[in-house]
Image: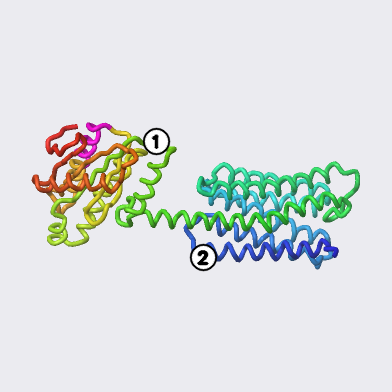
Amino acid sequence: MNIDESTLMMVLGVASITASAMFFALHASARHIAGVRLWALGCLSVGFAVLLDAPRLVENWQWASLLFNIPLSAGQALFLVGTAHFVSRPAKKHTLSLLVVIVVLLTVVFTLLLPSSGLRIFTLSTFQACVNGYTAWLLWRYREPQSSRSYWVASAVVLAQAAAALAQGLLVLTSSVTVTYAAPELPFANIVTWVGAMANALIGNWILFLLVMLRLVSELKAVAAQDSLTGLLNRRGLRSHIDSLLTPTRSVQSLAVLLLDIDHFKTVNDQHGHDVGDKVLAMMGDVMRALGSPHIAPCRWGGEEFCLVVDSYSDKSLVELAEHARREFERTTRSHPDLPCGATVSIGLASMQIDSSFEFSKLVASADAQLYLAKRGGRNRVCSATNGGGRWAPDFVI
């Protein structure tokens, strides 16, 4: 069965319009993801150009050229700017307008003012090759680690389209045959172009759709692993962090846990209301987040309890860290108008070597026992078991 060019164009046009609807639907439900609306407009522009040109409804080749080339090339520009926004490298304010102006000028000049199908095809193909090549580079350069393979595929498909456009332009430029509208005199050049266009419409757009879905999944995972009030890891997120530390490739020798419990937190809620209580929790979150590092993972353990998991440490540095957290929380909460004396925190600290018998639950239980001693000892202090036995360190100075 033979499939003519008009049929291929109809397939490409329908695929582009379908992709446009898909991206518009995604944008409606995920407006915070930049670039998706521009991709939708790009697909719509390409689909409009192809569907209008496929049945050759416009007999005048000059009008047909304007109605096909301007929206087609503008669609490629929309994809470029949309991709720049998607990878958080937004283009300058008037970049899209400038690209569209270039497309209009090239088309008008070589269609109406200096009619030349060869120069029109070459200049617009070169423009599309540059735009698509830069789009492919953005997808490759700023790929997200968790979706790296999908970015690679998307980049390769767009790069193939860029290569096809450039090949068509060079074949037309170097041809000894005078070409007319759509260059039917150069069937090989048209085949190359169609391969790139079909790959982009049938594969590239769906890969971009996949990138959006992967980002949404990543965001959902992040939300599931975070405490909504403080922005710290919750227990689920901390469990994932611990699992990553205990993988053979990390070679972590020991872990320490600091359990922090805000003193008399129920009294704060009862006397000042839950709004003030939430503010105190948020302040603790700020203190904890400031302490975070590649070796220190802050977490909201539950209620008014917080947790720091530390690797690569010394006993002295752990006590210093705990004392710094204790003093910084008290200092920070004094800034609240309802708490002129501030709020305080008690901290239990424990560490453990990682061997075949290591269990994180045992380490937490040891830190919890020290926290209990700190509460019994008068609160607002650090109680540590890093040296094999409990000891209070209320006056430790950094």
Above-or-below relation of 141 to 12: above
Residue at image position (63%, 46%) is: 136
Q: What segment carries the magenta color? A: 314-325
Residue at image position (62%, 58%) is: 206
On the rendered image, what quadrant is the N terminus found in?
bottom right
Q: Which residue is mark 2?
A: 28
Above-or-below relation of 315 to 215: above
Give coordinates of residue 117: x percent, y percent: 83, 51
Q: Foreground residue, 373 or 217?
A: 373
On the rendered image, what quadrant is the C terminus found in?
top left
Q: Residues within 10 Å of mark 1 (few under 14, many from 20)?
A: few
Q: Which residue is mark 1?
A: 251
Give coordinates of residue 395: x percent, y percent: 12, 35
- Left or right side of 43 for 88: left
Residue 287 in view in this figure: no
For the stretch drawn in magenta, the main secondary structure is helix
- Left or right side of 251 for 57: right
* Residue type indicated by callout 2: Ala
Above-or-below relation of 179 to 321: below
- Left or right side of 382 for 82: right
Q: Foreground residue, 368 or 186?
A: 368
Q: Foreground residue, 163 or 206?
A: 206
